[in-house]
């Protein structure tokens, strides 16, 4: 269920769900893409997250106008089959152990797995990059196996 709330006197916060899940992230991405396509000169900034979008707008518009516009855009986007951003597969070479991963033995022992099992579990899935973080190159990933010692996005959310 879509939840809309004011975010100060020049922004609106739109929440698409409470859990970090592909379905919710796809809704956020589709809505953000629709806002960019329909954007007028009133838009200052658009901030998508795992579960929400915050729209910062120029002061000549008021909260009521933006709320009506958001519902209209959301319904238009819902009428279509929510488009998913074109994904691309990126293969990243990974090194395990020694100076590249000094905690690998600890992770394996902690989870009752062999080092080879940890590596196999870590490299088997295709991960979805939900977003790139505040540190250059630090991705927030979906699809991680908690048995390898890496948290799932839901566990990592604060």
Image (cartoon, helix red, strand yellow):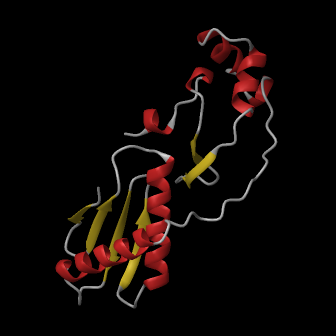
Query: In the picture provided, is 62 more to the left or to the right than 80?
Result: left
The spot of residue 26 in percent (x, y) is 50, 57
Question: What residue is shown at x 48% (from left), y 54% (from top)?
Answer: 25
The x and y percentages for residue 13 are: 29, 64
Q: Give residue 149's position: percent from left, percent from top.
A: 58, 23
Q: Which quadrant does the C terminus fall into?
A: top left
Residue for point 48% across, 79% down: 36
The residue drawn where x is 24% and y is 75% is 67
Q: Is residue 80 above or below residue 42?
A: above
Image location of residue 134, percent across then percent down: 52, 54
Q: Is residue 153 left or right of residue 113?
A: left
Residue at 63% of width from left, 8% of height from top?
112
- The vertical placement of 88 against 141, above or below, is below
Quadrant where the N terminus sits is bottom left
Front residue of 15/105: it is 15
- For residue 57, which quarter of the picture? bottom left
Residue 130 higher or lower than 120, as above or below: below
Q: Nearer the viewer, residue 14 or 93?
A: 14
Of 12 and 21, the residue lying toward us = 21
């Amino acid at each position: 269920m879509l939840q809309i709330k004011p975010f100060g006197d020049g922004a609106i916060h739109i929440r698409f769900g409470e859990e970090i899940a592909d379905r919710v992230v796809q809704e956020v991405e589709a809505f953000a893409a629709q806002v960019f396509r329909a954007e007028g000169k009133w838009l200052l900034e658009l901030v998508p997250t795992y579960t929400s979008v915050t729209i910062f707008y120029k002061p000549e518009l008021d909260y009521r106008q933006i709320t009506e516009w958001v519902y209209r855009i959301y319904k238009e986007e819902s009428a279509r089959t929510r488009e998913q951003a074109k994904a691309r597969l990126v293969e990243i070479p990974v090194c395990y152990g020694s100076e590249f991963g000094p905690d690998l033995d600890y992770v394996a022992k902690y989870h009752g797995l062999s080092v080879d099992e940890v590596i196999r579990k870590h490299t088997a899935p295709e991960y979805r990059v939900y977003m790139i973080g505040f540190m250059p190159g630090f991705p927030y990933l979906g699809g991680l196996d908690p048995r390898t010692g890496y948290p799932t996005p839901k566990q990592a959310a604060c």
